[in-house]
Amino acid sequence: MTSMVVCVPVTAEGWIDPRWGRADRVALAEVADGAVVSWNELDVGWSRAHDAGPEGSHHARIARFLIEHRVEAVVANHMGEGMLNMLRRMGLDVRLGAQGDARAAAAALAG
């Protein structure tokens, strides 16, 4: 069984948060064979941090988070071109257009 760590912006109700770079909460999901093996939600407060400095520092903050948590893929509704380019340069699998149940969206990546 091969697993991967997926990061998903999530609302308090468990839905995909449409804001990636301004998400207040994300889930780190370990997925394997189309199922969520583990699910850990973290408060990241990116909405507050987004305008706290230049755009590059916010992108760097998100990049550090993803590296620290060994994220291999991001599932989100949408994101800006600068963020998308950064994540792809990091070698991450980025899937956009996600909506609805966040766990189901994460599991679908490994299906």
Image (tube, rainbow, N blue to C red):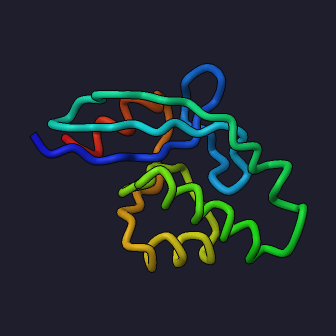
- Classify residue 35 by image quadrant: top left
Q: Nearer the viewer, residue 61 or 50?
A: 61
74 on left or right of 60: left
Q: Quadrant of the N terminus?
A: top left
Furthest residue in direction front, as rendered: 68
Q: Residue at x 42, y 54 (%)?
A: 71
Q: Is 36 rendered above or below residue 84?
A: above
Whole-percent x, y for residue 16 in the image = 55, 36
Q: Nearer the viewer, residue 43 or 11?
A: 43
35 on left or right of 54: left
92 on left or right of 62: left
Q: Residue at x 36, y 30 (%)?
A: 104
Furthest residue in direction left, as rendered: 1
Q: Quadrant of the C terminus?
A: top left
Q: Nearer the viewer, residue 51 or 81?
A: 51
Whole-percent x, y for residue 23 in the image = 69, 45
- Classify residue 108 by image quadrant: top left
Q: Residue at x 35, y 46 (%)?
A: 5
Total marks drawn?
Answer: 0
